[in-house]
Amino acid sequence: MTALNVSMSPPASSAVRPVDGLVDRKLALWHLVASLVFLGVALLAGFSFSLQFLQKYPFPGIELLSPGRWRLVHTNGVAYGFLANAFLGCLYWAVPRLTGQPVYSRALSWFIFWAWQAIVGVTAVGLILGHAQALEWGETPTYVDPVAFLGLILVAVNFLTPIFRAKGPMYVTLWYFIAAFVWTPLVYAMGNFLAQYLVGGAAGGAIGGLFIHDLVGLFVTPLGWGLMYYFVPIILKKPMWSHGLSLVGFWGLAFFYPLTGIHHFLYSPIPLFLQHGAVITTIAIEFVVTTVIINFFGTLAGRGDALRTSLPIRWFYTGMVFYFTTCLQCSFQTTLTFQRLIHFTDWVVGHAHLVMFGVFGFWLLGSILYLFPRLIGAKAYYSDALNSWHYWLSALGTLIMFTDLLVAGVVQGNLWRNLAPWEESLIASMPFWLIRSVSGTMIIVGNFMFFWNLYKTWQMTVASRQTQPAMPGTSPMPA
């Protein structure tokens, strides 16, 4: 593997001490560490779940370790343990630098950190004990929901305060962050309170569908794109190609995305005009996403060498290609015609893995790769080769899993449409399920290589700091 430059030198703006002093490096670091701990647990839970399809599940007959419960640990661990923690760590770095203001309260920030780890931990235990709610992506136990909702409001207060106090320009990144802080508590309340306690039947299903997709589109998407609008120009050292397309992408997301979620329940008792509306807005989102992708690749023009020399940029742009792919796929698969073939098949599972890990996971892993040495004061990574292996195993593993499950979905759909015996579809699926487990192994090995590299880099930095006195005027880094 060729060594890759991870751009250890921070941009000139981050060398300004008044701005640099606004960032609580230790807090950002520990959020990123927590995110990777939960990612490791979630990956292992997902892999163990996949083994049941190969009749190799390691804990048969043990209720607390049943595969259905560990699947929920896998999905919730990725969403709330990995993604949410990584977003928070990146926000503690980006928001003070963009606003020139500290977050509302350092004490509140640390309270949020420990409270959020407790929420994710209690959720995992509750899911294992069988306390899950019967709502996709809303399985968090009922006793966790009010606390999580309060936590989301505290996060919004902590970050919106410096944004509204800022005197300078309102960057597009901050537009996306503001939207996420406003939308996320509303989406969480809609999915976990309305559908659970107030609205039932087909109407409750419609609200559940909106929650499922709005959790991705109004929580994960604005934070993810907001970070890309922050990191990409800094690393490439050039402004975004088009401010106008930035606005189109933002307002297109705000206008179309809230209405798409019912496409999860096509051919259901939900009124057909709502299903048709979800199909139309889903297709419209693909056009919006295309404008954003064009903007970022226009920004890359003249700096294409960065795909070779900067590994964070490679993570970011791989995620963008996957994002365009998954949205293009979504605009087809949500049509009623396409749903006749792939409804309830592994095609949908492949789609979900590509968007949650292949897009947002890749963006956050690239962000962590960029931030980690800056947060601990490292001059270099322990091993550039391990970083390269991490990227290639994750990228190839994700691509193989996505393609494999898409083909599996087509095979399954055709068998079911032709009224083949159920057992025949199981037998036909097993080779695809084996490939899924193999590709999952590639992803796990790559990420644990990354974990080891981060640990050794941290260890190397601590040892270096103990043997060399700090230079006068430098800011101490947390060990």
Image (cartoon, grey):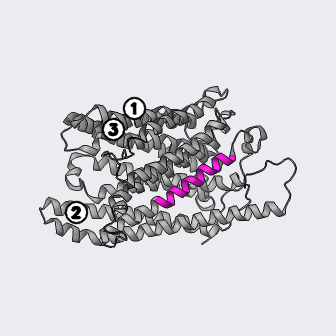
Do residues under tags 2 and 1 come within 8 Å of each other at their CB atoms?
no
Which residue is labeled 1 in the image? 255
Determine the image quadrant of residue 105: top right
Q: Which mark is residue 283?
A: none
Q: Residues within 10 Å of mark 3 (few under 14, many from 20)?
A: many
Q: Which mark is residue 412?
A: 2
Answer whether residue 286 is visible to the viewer in this image.
yes
Which residue is drawn at the image coordinates 19% and 35% (left, top)? Answer: 271
CA separation in Å, label 2 and label 1 = 35 Å
Report helix, strand or loop for mark 3.
helix
Q: Amino acid at mark 2?
A: Gln
Q: Is residue 284 left or right of residue 13?
A: left
Q: Amino acid at mark 3?
A: Leu
Residue 362 vs 164, above or below: the answer is: below
Which residue is labeled 3 in the image? 210
Q: Is residue 477 left or right of residue 3?
A: right
Query: Closer to us: mark 3 or mark 2?
Result: 3
Dividing the image into 4 quarters, which one contains the N terminus? bottom right
Answer whether residue 432 is visible to the viewer in this image.
no
Q: Magenta segment, principal secondary structure?
A: helix
Which comes sooner in the sequence, label 3 or label 1? 3
Report helix, strand or loop for mark 2.
helix
> Is 37 contained in the magenta span?
yes
Report helix, strand or loop for mark 1.
helix
Residue 277 vs 375, above or below: the answer is: above
Which residue is drawn at the image coordinates 46% and 61% (left, top)? Answer: 43
**Stretch in magenta:** 25-41
CA separation in Å, label 3 and label 1 = 14 Å
